[in-house]
Amino acid sequence: MNTETTTDPADTTPSGILLGRFTPGTAAWDEARAGLTITATEIAAVVGLSPWQSRFSLWHKKSGLPTPPFEMNPAVEWGNRLEDAVATKFADDHPDLIPCPTGTWRHRDRAWQVATPDRLLHPAPLNVLTPTEPTAIFEAKTSPFGDDWGPAGSDEFPVHYRCQILWQQDTTGLTAPAHLAVLIGGWDYREYVVEYDATEATLLRSAAEGFLVEVRDGIRPPIDGADATYQTIRVQPDGLDDVDVEVPLEDAARYEIAQQQMATVKTELTAAKGVLLDHIGTGKRAVVGNRRIAYRTVHDGKTHSLNPYTSKDTAA
């Protein structure tokens, strides 16, 4: 008797090999992404465009050196919780496409190129007995304020998400226009189309290969001003030796000048905050035209703090 083996269409892409479907944060999930690989969430750090990682912090991670532990925060937690809601909204608006959960993929020829898309888009089948193969990438995001997000359908969205999606397209070979959906402030839903660009993909691959060479050769990136870099440096030393360490004069001068400048800037910031709070009065937000600058929080009827709207408020 002849037997045939069938492949689930969800396990097949033009250039991707499915490593597995892992729960984020588990040991299996970490193992699939570990070692000398570059994932879709890491490629922006390689090219210096990530708001969460720096080349310095990523280099230490890939080199097996200490890095700050991952800490779940409300933005990440609710981004994960609302992913299904955003995907459901997309499915409701696009009945011809089905956003299906997927797993972690690596490129067929480049084992170091790894990606875990939020969903793969499948054309709706003609009947339930005829499954379809995936045709495009889908990413679901959330943002509290939407400062970096332009009108729906525009190409105005955070550049690190473009890097992420382009890497996913290049890894899986699903180079058809990808769909990016975001839920802003819990109610403002917007969609964007991300076109694949072969030239950009080549540049990202070249940057990733060069970065991995630096990891293998022990060439540490320079220290930059990213908070991720500073936090990585903080966790390197283990212990405390009661000794004096001679440092270069230029590095000492840089530190002392920065301290003086910070004191001056802190004074100016306090004055600027006072001016804005005076303008706001009993209101909630300071705006210039359609752009939000800062918002006021109140506790027991009195001003608690003045908080800036920044790009870092965007959830991952």
Image (cartoon, grey):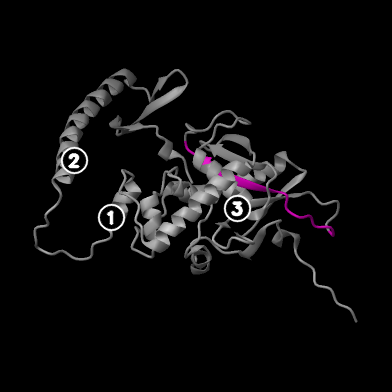
Q: Position of residue 313 (x, y in %)?
A: 42, 39
Viewer-nearest of discs 3 and 2: 2
Q: CA distance from mark 2 to mark 1?
A: 18 Å
Q: Position of residue 272 (x, y in %)?
A: 26, 24
Q: Residues within 10 Å of mark 3 (few under 14, many from 20)?
A: many
Q: Amino acid at mark 1?
A: Ile
Whether 143 is among the magenta residues is yes
> Label 3's element?
loop
Q: Which residue is mark 2?
A: 254
Mark 2 or mark 1: whose residue is earlier in sequence: 1
Q: Does residue 315 show up magenta in the picture?
A: no
For badge 3, the amino acid type reads Pro
Q: Position of residue 314 (x, y in %)?
A: 46, 40
Give the labeled residue for mark 1: 233
Nearer mark to the viewer, of 2 and 1: 2
Image quarter in which the N terminus is found: bottom right
**Tag on residue 117?**
3
- Residue found farthest to the bottom: 1
Q: Secondary structure at mark 1?
A: helix
Residue occupying the point 78% across, 43% down? 96
The residue sitting at the right extreme is 1
